[in-house]
Image (spheres, rainbow, N blue to C red):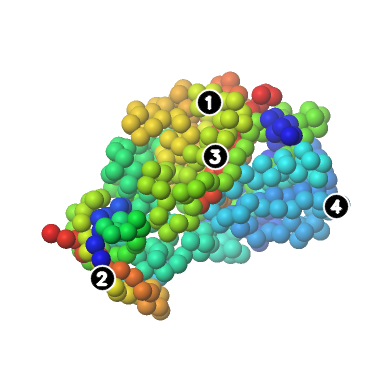
Amino acid sequence: MIRLNSATAVVGLGLRQYKRAQAPLPERGVLVHAIVDACGDAGISPADVDGFVSYGDDRNEPVRLMPDLGTRELRWSSAVWGGGGGGIAGAFGIAAAAILTGQAETVVVFRALAQGDSGRLSAAVMAHHLNDHMMGAGILAPAQPCALRAQRMFEYHGVPRQVTEELVRASYYHGARNPEAVAYGVRFDPEQLRTSRWISEPFRLFDCSRENDGAAALILVSAERARDLRKPPVYLAGVAQGTEKGWGDLIENDDADVYATAGFRPVARRLWEQTGLKPADIDVAQIYENFSAQGVASLIDHGFCDYESAGEFVRFENLIAPTGKLPVNTHGGNFAQGFIHGVGCAVEAVRQLRGESANPVPNAKTCLLAGGPGAPTVSSAVFANEML
Amino acid sequence: MRGTIFTWTRTWHPFGGTEAIGVPFVSVVVSLDDAPVRLTGLLAETDADVRIGAAVEGTASVTRIGDDDVPSIRWSLRA
């Protein structure tokens, strides 16, 4: 078996983000710029990118990017199934698989969204799950099924509702200090959250992520090749995607003991087995939060805390850089940095381990990336700035 | 058809397609008493103090979604 551990590394980043429906170029143009930026960051030619991986129903088929990028040979194009953000970390696993088996050398993981081309993300995601059972119950938007799970986590499993406010506050704390964040310079008053309008109980407006136009690209190459490139390598230490029996698109009939989770239990178990790491070994985490409760459930699923200890662990002071026990979403997360289907979380994982974050975590060596909580399939990865 | 509320949400945002229902409305997931299955539907009592575990009774109905009448169960709290 070829081992994944630290055999590949992210060597280039590009991120272009705009307000929703305000991208200055069509979606493909924004994406091409992000990829060119990532290649410049890595010190490689865009023409040398020979592999492309995305997730979440991205519409930009790689072959169509070739003329603009000057691609010499397209050797690998693929995507993680599923319409939600559950493929964000898994996309790196696919890219690494291509590299480690010699099928491609320079693979870009990307996601692009511009409302003018792809419409509202929430509608695109929900289209995967709509059927008469859901529609007949008035459930037409992602906030609602996530609210059903959140309600169960609070009311039945007894997780204190305060945890969501703590997570949102931490996101805004980081976002306010990140010049690239939508919340840059914004002073967030928790009272705003508490009094904001209900969307779908238990979610208020500030429990929900917002959508942005934009694109991000991350270049993955072999660890050997990464050593000769411009930026310090950020190794892919491990990655897992998928689900297990009892969870999926089951029309709310998921097993009772996992119903209120974010779906990460089997993925986290494999990730820890694969890397030999445990939650306490993670220095910082970028946790895709489509909705506040799903971010908290992700932390629980990965073993940072459980239903009983969530109230103690998920506290603002624990979640912020540089002093928190586990700084989370140090760019501001989907809530406060911006939401291009969660790809900003992957960008921040790499920046944090390069020491380029706007909210650096001193001496951070490992970063968890968790994608798409609540989706039928999810994925997680651990990145590291040393070979593990 | 009888069961208990497994989970619920009260929607206040007028998501596209729900216009004919009107907000707020309560969506429920119900564990059936007589089968190991959960079914969805709307709860008739939109302003009720809804709780997980509450006993409900359901009848066949339709929910207007956009221009379609979608077959659905309408649940009511049992005393």
User: N-terminal of the two: label 1 or label 4?
Assistant: 4
Residue type at mark 3 is Val
Residue type at mark 4 is Glu
Q: Which element is circle 3 on?
A: helix
Q: Is residue A172 visible?
A: no
Subunit of label 1:
A
Q: For residue B59, which numbered disc appears in the image?
A: 2
Circle 3 residue: A267
Residue A68, image quadrant: bottom right
Circle 4 residue: A73
Marks 4 and 2, how far apart at CA: 60 Å
* Residue at the image position 41 percent from the left and 39 percent from the top: A296
Subunit of label 2:
B
Both labels 4 and 2 in a single chain: no
Q: Nearer the viewer, residue A61 or B1?
A: B1
Q: For residue A278, which numbered disc appears in the image?
A: 1
Residue A191, position as x, y percentages in the image: 30, 42
Q: Is residue A155 left or right of residue A39?
A: left
Residue type at mark 1 is Lys
